[in-house]
């Protein structure tokens, strides 16, 4: 059985995932969409803000899960993605 393979242009394209600003923007947009979808479906989500891990519930209430001990020791996005 023969399968047809579509030919794709080999033109050089800039990979948007290599651009850290674009990657950060895509991540923010995806996070926002995921939070909105979770709340619409009645599911809580957990997030970190100002050194505190919190959980937001669909009714709008927020509970503190725990405080982050060392919030200054997080790697930057670039450090996290560009590990050798």
Image (cartoon, rainbow, N blue to C red):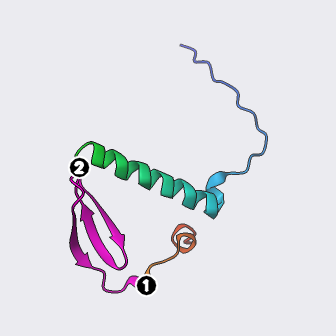
Q: Quadrant of residue 74?
A: bottom left
As drawn, the residue found furthest toward the front would be: 60
Residue 65, image x and y in percent? Answer: 21, 72
Which disc number belongs to residue 73? 1
| Number of residue marks | 2
Query: Looking at the picture, does residue 4 appear above or below residue 16?
Result: above
Residue 53, image x and y in percent? Answer: 29, 72
Taking the image as shown, residue 42 lies to the left or right of residue 14, namely left
> Which residue does the numbered mark 2 point to in the structure image?
43
Q: Find out whether the residues at labels 2 and 1 contact each other: C-beta distance under 8 Å.
A: no
| Crowding near the residue tagged with mark 2, few <14, some 14–19, many ≥20 C-alpha atoms within 10 Å | some
Q: Is residue 56 magenta?
A: yes
Measured Cα–Cα span from mark 2 to mark 1: 30 Å
- Name which residue lies at 30% across and 86% down: 69
- Name which residue lies at 62% across and 18% down: 4
Query: Looking at the picture, does residue 67 appear above or below residue 59?
Result: below
Residue numbers of the magenta segment: 44-72
Judging depth in this view, the residue of 7 and 62 nearest the camera is: 62
């Amino acid at each position: 059985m023969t399968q047809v393979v579509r030919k794709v242009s080999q033109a050089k394209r800039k990979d948007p995932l290599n651009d850290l600003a674009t990657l950060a923007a895509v991540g923010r947009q995806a996070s926002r969409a995921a939070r909105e979808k979770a709340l619409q479906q009645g599911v809580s989500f957990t997030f970190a803000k100002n050194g505190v891990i919190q959980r937001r519930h669909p009714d709008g209430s927020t509970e503190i899960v725990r405080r982050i001990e060392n919030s200054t020791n997080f790697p930057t996005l670039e450090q996290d993605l560009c590990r050798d």
